[in-house]
Every structure is written in C-alpha cells, then in structure tokens.
Image (cartoon, rainbow, N blue to C red):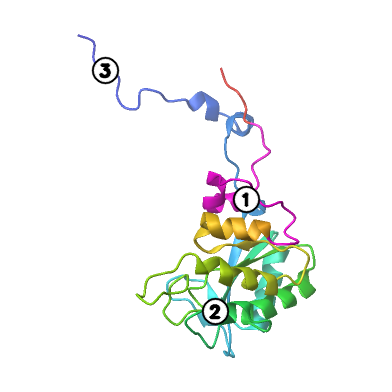
Amino acid sequence: MREPPPFPASRPRRLRRTAALRGLVRETDLSRGDLAAPLFVKESITEPVPVASMPGHYQHTLESLRKEAAELAGLGVPALLLFGVPAVKDAEGSQAWAPDGIVQQALRALEADLGDDVVLIGDLCLCEYTDHGHCGVLGADRSVVNDAGPRSTGPASSTRRSSPTPPSTPPRCTARSARRQRARPGSGTAPPTRWTPAMATRHCARPPSTRPRARTW
C-alpha cells in the first residue's frame, strides 16, 4: 500500500520563487495607502495621557493631536479616525453633537492644518459620551433602545460636517444607523430602497479593491 504524502501535500513554491511571480499572483496588498490611524483626543487635559491597553497611543490634547496628525500625514497615512473623550458625560451622550465638542474642535483644527491631503473620519459611537458607557440610549429597563440611536447619531454627524461630506463610522454599523446616515441631506448618496448586507458591516466604509487578480494555470 502506498504511503500518503506528508502534510501539506501541495507546496506551491514555484509561485513564490521570484519577486515578479509573487507580485503577479498575490491576492492582497497592504500598504500605507490602506491604513487609517486611530487618534484619541480628550477634553480638559494639558498633557497627552498614555493609553495603557494600547502601547504607543495617547489621549491627546488638541495641540498634541495636531502634531501627531501632521507626523502621520508626513508618513503618507491617508486617513485619520478620531475618537473623542469629553469632560462631561450624560445619559444621552449629548456632547457627541455639541457644536464645540472635543471631536468637533479637533476636526476643524485638523481640516485647517491638513486640508484635503488627509481623509478625516469621525467616530459616531456614543460609548465615550454616555455616563453608563453603552453605545446607545437606555430605556426605563436599562436596556439599549436601538431606535433612539440614529436620532442621536444624526445630530452628531451634522455637527462634525465642517467640510462638505466628511465620512463617519456609524455606531455598531446597524442597518438603521447606516441607512439614516446615507439618507441625510448632503451625504452624496440617495436613500437606499432596501436593506443590503453591506449596510450592516464596517467593510462598507471601504471602497472595493481595483487591483485585478492574476489567473494561474
């Protein structure tokens, strides 16, 4: 009886032999052009505060945020995702849509510094703005009221639109939140006529790759 070949049975080293071959059959490219850097900005601090669970990351002041953003732009990072930490929190997370909220101030400052060279993305999740820490408004039974979420993220998105149509990341990417954002005036997209799976995934925020896949025989 013939012995089975050792695992793995297939060793396609021929497709990795040279840089030209690897480039031809590679399905995924990852470069600085694919990245969005997360930045955290906190109200009422005078010095950057290290984030213990994320070495190398800080809760920034407005000034240190502008410096960090300029360095990232100089490195070729094309997008910045801003998370805000307000000094005052309440049950509805109202600082998320305050005209002078910390993220609104940060977006205006970075837009003035960087112009159109970097995409600025404002996170709309309410967890850092609510005193209970949930991503939405709580009902009388202390459970999250999903339908109240879009009524909060809509104003939050509007107060962050210092430029015509900056992107945003809807909290939890629920179909209702994504649909509400797409239907807002000035969003540049028509209201969807039906729900699609793309509305319920964070991957919908990313344009599809235009790099063709090489066929191998």
Counting residues from the start of the chain, the first of labels 3 and 1 encountered is: 3
Residue designated by label 2? 59
Which residue is at 53% across, 30% downward?
16
Q: Whole-percent x and y of residue 46?
A: 59, 91
Q: CA distance from mark 2 to mark 3?
A: 57 Å
In the image shown, does 154 or 47 lie closer to the viewer?
A: 154
Q: Nearer the viewer, mark 1 or mark 2?
A: 1
Farthest-out residue, top: 1
Disc 2 is placed on an element classified as strand
In the image shown, does 181 or 148 lie closer to the viewer?
A: 148
Q: Quadrant of the C terminus?
A: top right
46 relative to 168, above or below: below
Q: Whole-percent x and y of residue 76?
A: 70, 59
Q: Whole-percent x and y of residue 53?
A: 42, 72
Q: Whole-percent x and y of residue 92?
A: 51, 79
Q: What's drawn in magenta, residue-wise?
A: 184-212
Q: CA distance from mark 1 to mark 2?
A: 26 Å
What secondary structure is the magenta-colored segment mainly? loop
Q: Amino acid at mark 3?
A: Pro
Q: Amino acid at mark 1?
A: Arg
66 relative to 208, above or below: below
Q: Is residue 112 magenta?
A: no
Q: Amino acid at mark 2?
A: Gln
Q: Nearer the viewer, mark 3 or mark 1?
A: 1
- Say whether residue 73 is left or right of residue 43: right
Counting residues from the start of the chain, the first of labels 2 and 3 encountered is: 3
Q: CA distance from mark 3 to mark 1?
A: 44 Å
Which residue is at 79% across, 74% downward?
112
Which residue is at 42% across, 74% downward?
138
Residue designated by label 1? 206
